[in-house]
Amino acid sequence: MATGSTPEENEDKPLDIQGDGQSVGVPASGEVEGNAFNPMGNPGEKHWQAGYIQEPGLEDRGNIFFAAVEMTRMPMIVTDPRQPDDPIVFANRAFLDLTLYEEKDLIGRNCRLLQGPDTNRDTVAEIRAALAERRAIAVDILNYKADGTPFWNALYIGPIFDKEGELLYFFASQMDITQRRASEQSSMQAQKMEAIGQLTAGMAHDFNNLLQVINGNLELALLAVNNTGAAADPIRRAQRAAMKAGKLTQQLLTFARKQRLEPKRVNLNALLVEFSELLVRTLGDRVEMQLDLKPGLPSCKLDPTHFEMALLNVLINARDAMPNGGRVRVSTTVVTGDQVAVCVSDEGEGMAPEVVRRATEPFFTTKGPGTGLGLAMVHGFVQQSRGRLEIDSTPGQGTTVRMVFPVDGARELAAHGEDEAESAALESAKARILVVEDNEDVRELAETMLESAGYAVVSAPSGEQALNVLDEGAEIDLVFTDVMMPGGMNGLQLADHVRLRRPGTPILVTTGYMDELPAARGQRLDILSKPYRQEDLLARVRAILPQANG
């Protein structure tokens, strides 16, 4: 919002005299720039913020200026503050097109007829204050058309005086900026979510390293007491708590679209049938679930495990929205020729528009004990799967959540997994593993886990030092490296150098998150997610080493 000068302030300003003094204007001089969109593309300097005329009245409509006003696509009106309630006394045809009102329904009425239930009262108060002070104002306001349709209006109002300074009229121009405003808000929301996602991903990566140390040492402590004794139960409880923290981290990574997905060509109908028993148990006895599956639904490519998690989150929200029970309908449909969707519709309380707008923000929740990560995780998974999430909701009428995914255009390919050698595994004591990890605690933990299983371990805190180990001629049977390492070389770059220096040497990478890593590198990677347990690490190592030496 911006306002112009008062009549008293205008007395000291240079004037723009037109028609040998028939009309005089006070240039805006860049003072009235209160709209989100400027139709001129730059600050207004020369257009008037206030006008002074010799001949009041609207009767003369036979000149070029009246034709220009009716020909322009800029909606315009004139009001008369000398009459009670400052009524509209002129509206051009563009204003009728904008508001859908007929001229007979406008003339003689105050402009407040354009206001509605969501019009900001503070904005209205600002306009009234500017008019009372007889100064120009530029402001964006939510108005309503004759059929009730809301629109954002870039409103500009300026006063018109006679030669003696008596206020005669207010002139107002409008512009529908609804689409522009929606685009700007969408862009701002996307930037905000991306910034939160980047922050979340970085925090989750560090948190995963901490959880790796906690989980790993708890596992070693449990082994040290032979899984028995008074200390065993507290250790197991601590393990369960740490694993729950790990799942929370994975939810954060999914929201940030940094979770490693393993997409497969699947049919959503088949997945829903497969999950149906679990879905029914999740909803409980008071909620009835209906499946409505479109026959012949095209296949799509997504991670079935993460899809199941996303669907469960949506269903839990639907269940919680119906505390007294109700019906949930889970359906599939073809959105367009190249998109399919899973729709979850409930008969619950519904959400207000402002809640819908924030529904996918992390940590935003309307449920007391909720974490606010459910729909954020769903949104992240769907976007990472190259789809989109749509939410329609009306208070008191329920909510529909649609997960839309692209159809997989690839034909069914024959399985082409690598042939596994059937030779016996080497004795672990004969295998030498290079562990590359910048975090000292995580590195020492990995060393302990591998050494306790009989492997010989060489370690390096960076990719550069790992290459030095290889260049010195050390015999290495497996490279086990973290992906995210500060400095000049990350784990992926190290893997490239290892393939050049030691072709055929197997590489196992570990990370807390991965942004489409396998596809981006164009290489088949063996990946172990953090936090990992000792048995997970050893199982992957044993699976890789026979293949490398068979």
Image: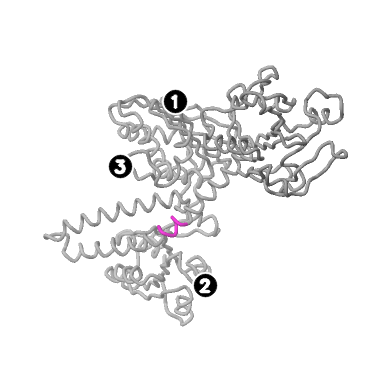
Q: Which mark is residue 488?
A: 2
Count neighbours of disc 2 (C-alpha within 10 A) and say few if under 14, some if 14 to 19, many if 20 or more. Answer: few
Distance Cα–Cα, label 1 vs label 3: 32 Å
Look at label 2 and name its amino acid.
Gly
Instruction: Tell me: 14 left or right of 143.
Output: right
User: Nearer the observer, disc 1 or disc 3?
Assistant: 3
Which residue in the protein does label 1 denote? 292
In terms of secondary structure, where does tag 3 sit? Answer: loop
Tell how many labels. 3
Where disc 2 sits, the SS reads loop
- Specify the quadrant that holds the C terminus: bottom left
Q: Are marks 2 and 1 in contact (CB under 8 Å)?
A: no
> Where is 291 relative to 388, above or below?
above
If you read the primary sequence from the N terminus, does the residue marked by circle 1 or circle 3 appear first? 1
At 48% from the left edge and 39% from the top edge, which residue is drawn? 357
As drawn, is 126 to the left or to the right of 376?
right
Q: Residue 423, located in which quarter of the rendered image?
A: bottom left
Q: Position of residue 100 (x, y in %)?
A: 66, 23
Viewed as shown, does residue 220 lie left or right of 116?
A: left
Looking at numbered disc 1 in the image, what kind of residue is underneath it? Answer: Asp
* Amino acid type at mark 3: Pro
Mark 3 or mark 2: whose residue is earlier in sequence: 3
Image location (x, y in percent) of residue 412: 54, 41
Please identify the quadrant where the N terminus is shown.
top right
At horizontal 78% and vertical 28% (from top left) the residue drawn is 56
Q: What residue range appears in magenta?
A: 199-204
Determine whether 354 is above or below 461 in the image: above
Q: Which mark is in front, 3 or 2? A: 3
Q: Residues within 10 Å of mark 1 (few under 14, many from 20)?
A: some
